[in-house]
Image (spheres, coloured by chain):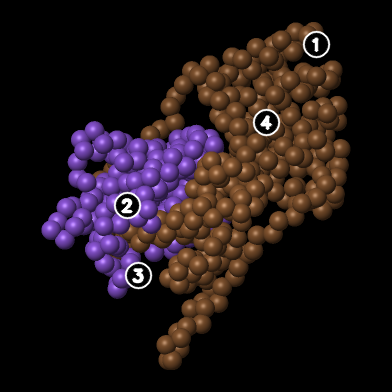
Chain colours: A brown, B purple
Amino acid sequence: MTCDAAAKLIPLYGYGELTPSEEERLERHLDQCADCALEVRRQRSLAAALDERRLQVPAALLEDCRAGIVAAVDRGEPRAHRPARGSWALFWGAVSESLAGLGRVGQPVSAVALVAIGFFAARFAGVGPGSISTLSLAPSDSVFSTVRSVEPDNAGRVRIAFDETRRRVVSGNLDDQAIQRLLVAATREDNAAVRVESVDVLKNHAASNEVRDALLNAASHDPNAGVRLKAVEGLKPLAGDPGVRRTLAQALLTDDNAAVRTQVVDLLVSHRDDSVVGVLQGLVQREDNSYVRLKCEQALKEMNASIGTF
Amino acid sequence: MAQEAAGTAASARVSPQVETLVREAQRGDQGAFEELVRTYDRSVLNLALNLLRSPEDARDVYQEAFLRVYRNLPTFRFDCSFQTWLYRIVTNICLDLLRKRKVRKEEPSVMETSEGPVDRMEGFEEESARSDPERTLWNRQLRGKIERALEELTPRERLVFELRHYQGMRLRNIGEVLGTSEEAAKNCLFRATRKMRAELGDFV
């Protein structure tokens, strides 16, 4: 590695924002280059000086702000309502919403983590005694705890009981039963991005009954349209399965997202099955999205069924 | 303080209670809305105060941000985490303020005095910094240089730097909040640190 290349990596090094291979190459260079090693030390001093200007929120300011927002809400600030939109606008809205959900698929799962750790804290132990003691008290990114009791004693010490959950990382083959079980459990997580990712991974393994059930459950009950779309996609190879068709036909009548309904219609009509005619006829009557209605009408026409039930 | 506030927000991230609170607040439960505010407001205020170095501006950001949350909560559809949504609102308001300041060139956070440059917010610093016995003239000059270096950053560079350095947010999350890629956030952070190193020269 040249010094120029190292100079581009050094600022990000202390924040732990390099890839493992970048980090390794930089560290090999630092072992051999005194100038770049000095630059790292200077970055560290700069970071320490920057840490000194950190402000703390005065309690009075926080209280004042809280009182202000409560008063504003009490005064009856107007709130937005979900806009009433035409069916096309509704459809495109639903599609873009679903795509926004799907866009998260490629990203590793992590919500906004706001655990403030000092610059270089992860990499250099010698930030300063102040920072270290604060760090050891701060909740780390991998431990989430709930304090159950706090009991001070007369000697000025305190006894704190808390539950903690540690993050564990497991990796394995997708055919591994244990991995599949974890993924199935992840489809019921609160975090929608986790659900999208797990359903996306599971969708190629729908042959297993457990996975099939998880996908069916996600397709019909998940609150996030992106997850439902992924689940329906995963169920496509099982379009001929009567159980799958029954559940999806039911979901078709209740799903509020036009993109999901479109996918379900596509899946249902991909197999010639007269039992689906009634569902499609029912949908045509009540569907307010013109694109979905059109799809149903086309499918019914291809099946030589009448569009109306009357 | 910052760690504590940020820790609260990080724990809330994994708490299923947040989603319940959001849904209750969406249905008009004011108690739930206030609890939601209390879950995140210290981190929001911390960000605004450290970024803008003015309690008045920080207060304005707080008010405006949570009012927007209150008004628009019924349209929030869980397409991203509530925290990401909240930080999008907060960072937009902060960016607007920083841009206005750049145009007006108002209220520099450093004042020139007979004793050298002094940060307007010095009294608000954390205890450990305030009680530093090594606070010499050299330290003061260093601080002045740092403040000026930070003021040279573009509003976006300043915000990314604040979120990464002081709020400890990962670049991937910063990209998500600012509606850009992790790579773009990385470039922004890189430019910010390079500018500061250039401004400070051999001072550190």
Q: Are marks 4 and 3 on the same chain?
A: no
| Residue name at image x 62 percent, y 39 percent | A107
Q: Do labels 2 and 4 share a chain?
A: no
Is disc 2 placed on a helix, strand or loop?
Answer: helix
In the depicted structure, whether residue A123 falls above or below residue A238? below
Q: Which of marks 1 and 4 is in front?
A: 4
- Decide: few, some or many residues near mark 3? Use Cα within 10 Å; few <14, some 14-19, many ≥20: few
| Image quarter of residue A305 | top right
Q: Estimate the x, y position of residue B8 in percent, counting from the top left.
A: 47, 60
In the depicted structure, whether residue A110 falls above or below residue B123? above
- Decide: few, some or many residues near mark 4? Use Cα within 10 Å; few <14, some 14-19, many ≥20: many
In the depicted structure, whether residue A81 falls above or below residue B165? above
Find out whether the residues at labels 2 and 4 contact each other: C-beta distance under 8 Å: no
Q: Which label number is shown at residue A303?
A: 1
- Check disc 2 and report the residue beneath it: B146
- Check disc 4 and report the residue beneath it: A229
Subunit bearing disc 2 = B
Q: Which label number is shown at residue B128?
A: 3
Task: Identify which residue, A278 or B133, lies in the foreground.
Answer: B133
Subunit bearing disc 4 = A
Amino acid type of the residue that numbered disc 4 sits on in the rendered structure: Leu
In the depicted structure, whether residue B124 falls above or below residue B147? below
Q: Estimate the x, y position of residue B137 in percent, counting from the top left.
A: 24, 64
Q: Which of marks 1 and 3 is in front?
A: 3
Distance from the alpha carbon under mark 1 to that under mark 2:
73 Å
Quarter of the picture holding the N terminus of chain A: top right
Find out whether the residues at labels 4 and 3 contact each other: C-beta distance under 8 Å: no
Q: Nearer the viewer, mark 2 or mark 4?
A: 2
- Decide: few, some or many residues near mark 2? Use Cα within 10 Å; few <14, some 14-19, many ≥20: many
Q: Estimate the x, y position of residue A46 in percent, counting from the top left.
A: 40, 56
| Residue name at image x 37 percent, y 59 percent | A49
| Residue name at image x 82 percent, y 37 percent | A206
